[in-house]
Amino acid sequence: MKDFFNKIHHIDQAILETYLSEWTAYQAPKKTILTAPGETERYIYFVQEGVQQSYYLNEDKKHVIAFTYPPSLSGIPESFLTQSPSKYYLETVTESSFLRLSYAKHQELMQEHREIETLFRKATELLLIGMVQRHYELMAFDINQRFSSFAQRSPQLFNLVAHKDLASYLRIDSSNFSKLFNSVKI
């Protein structure tokens, strides 16, 4: 976890140790809803093991927004940042292990240590950059390009996540996803 944060922004290691010492271990079985619509995200998670997905339901149809897996942060970012109710779900796809930090403790540590606030701002900037890139791919790429880009970025998910959920994430019809999956060597 220390290496993960140091790659985002290097801060005084004693301050980073103080920050990391406040994170607690948390485990969740497969198919556990960590946050549901209407609930406020109280934690930021660091994924140690497992895969999670965030999604919303519209007319009972599942629309996958994102997947998280090690090493990465997880949660419902806008709910955590604003302490407002989530509009969508965060669920474990596989059994998952995390370290997590409460919103209250996170705020307290950012108030005490400006370097932690800078670290978190830079992590948030990276999240925004990733979201803009994903939006670009969804808007500008055809299904072959979206599939190929995803296969290069996250090939391990093909064996861990239901293909219907991957198809939803990529905004590809399930039958087209199957054709693409069967035609490409991963």
Image (cartoon, rainbow, N blue to C red):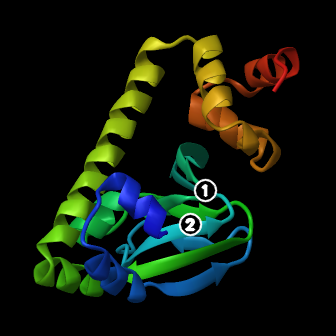
Q: Quadrant of residue 51 in the image? A: bottom right
Q: Secondary structure at mark 1?
A: loop
Residue that carries the numbered disc 1 in the rendered image? 69
Quarter placement of the C terminus: top right
Left or right: 140 as drawn, with respect to 170: left
Q: Residue at x 65, y 19 (%)?
A: 148
Residue 115 falls left or right of residue 17: left
Q: Residue furthest front?
A: 13
Q: Position of residue 54 (x, y in %)?
A: 52, 54
Q: Amino acid at mark 2?
A: Val
Tally the numbered discs.
2
Query: What residue do we see at 61% from left, 69% from top?
Result: 48
Q: Is residue 50 above or below residue 157?
A: below
Read off the residue under disc 2: 47
- Above-or-below relation of 165 to 120: above
- Between residue 7 and residue 143, name the one nearer to us: 7
Asked whether residue 145 is in view, the answer is yes
Q: Residue at x 56, y 86 (%)?
A: 25
**Mark 2 residue element:** strand
Evaluate if marks 1 and 2 touch, with contact meaning CB atoms under 8 Å apart.
Answer: yes
Above/below status of 38 relative to 18? above
Q: Residues within 10 Å of mark 1 (few under 14, many from 20)?
A: many
Q: Looking at the image, which residue is at 70% across and 60% down?
A: 93
Amino acid carrying label 1: it is Tyr
Can the viewer see residue 76 in this picture? no
